Image (tube, helix red, strand yellow):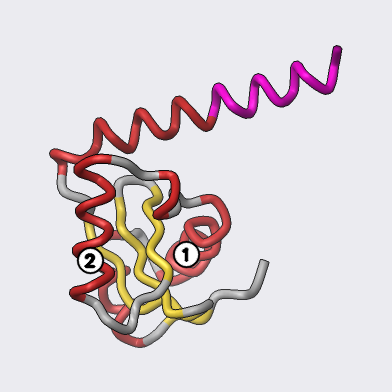
Amino acid sequence: MPKIIVTNHAEKRAKRVLPNKKAAMEIAQEAFDEGIRHEETAGRLRRYIDWLYFREKTANNIRIYHQKVFLFHGDVLITIFDLPQSLNTSVEAIKKKRKLDKYNEKNKRIK
């Protein structure tokens, strides 16, 4: 879990979508650690992430967290922007799957 570095541009963007700088740093770290990764996506959401990856050539690590898209280059946060609303249902489905997987994993250990 590397410490995230936030660029000036990401800081400016964070002011638009997040409450303050400290929250931006904390949420960026959470997004990096717990955000939805490319390999977890499918369908329209995956195509959207692919499109972002090819459009933003410097971003090699894209995460979705709290209906926001975080673009990282390694452990450096480049920018943040809102996820299109049409993709929110896909994100919710992934969250449900994660929750179910976590539940099943927990029950396996108990048995």
Q: Residue at x 26, y 61 (%)?
A: 50
101 lies left or right of 39:
right
76 w.r.t. 65: above or below:
below
Element at badge 2? helix
How much space separates mark 2 and mark 1, taking CA atoms? 18 Å
78 w.r.t. 35: above or below:
below
Q: Which quarter of the rendering shows the C terminus?
A: top right
3 w.r.t. 46: above or below:
below
Q: Residue at x 27, y 57 (%)?
A: 49
* Tag 1 residue: 28
Q: Quadrant of residue 104?
A: top right
Q: How many marks overall?
A: 2
Q: Give residue 40's position: percent from left, percent from top.
A: 43, 45
Element at badge 1? helix
Q: Nearer the viewer, mark 2 or mark 1?
A: 2
43 w.r.t. 17: above or below:
above
Magenta residue span:
99-111
Three-letter code, disc 1: Ala
* Tag 2 residue: 52
29 lies left or right of 87:
right
Q: Residue at x 35, y 79 (%)?
A: 78
* Nearest the eye: 80 or 21: 80
Q: Give residue 56's position: percent from left, percent from top.
A: 24, 77
Q: Give residue 15's position: percent from left, percent from top.
A: 29, 69
Q: Is residue 100 covered in magenta?
A: yes
Q: Is residue 53 covered in magenta?
A: no
* Nearest the eye: 62 or 39: 39
Farthest top residue?
111
Sequence-first tag of 2 and 1: 1
Three-letter code, disc 2: Leu
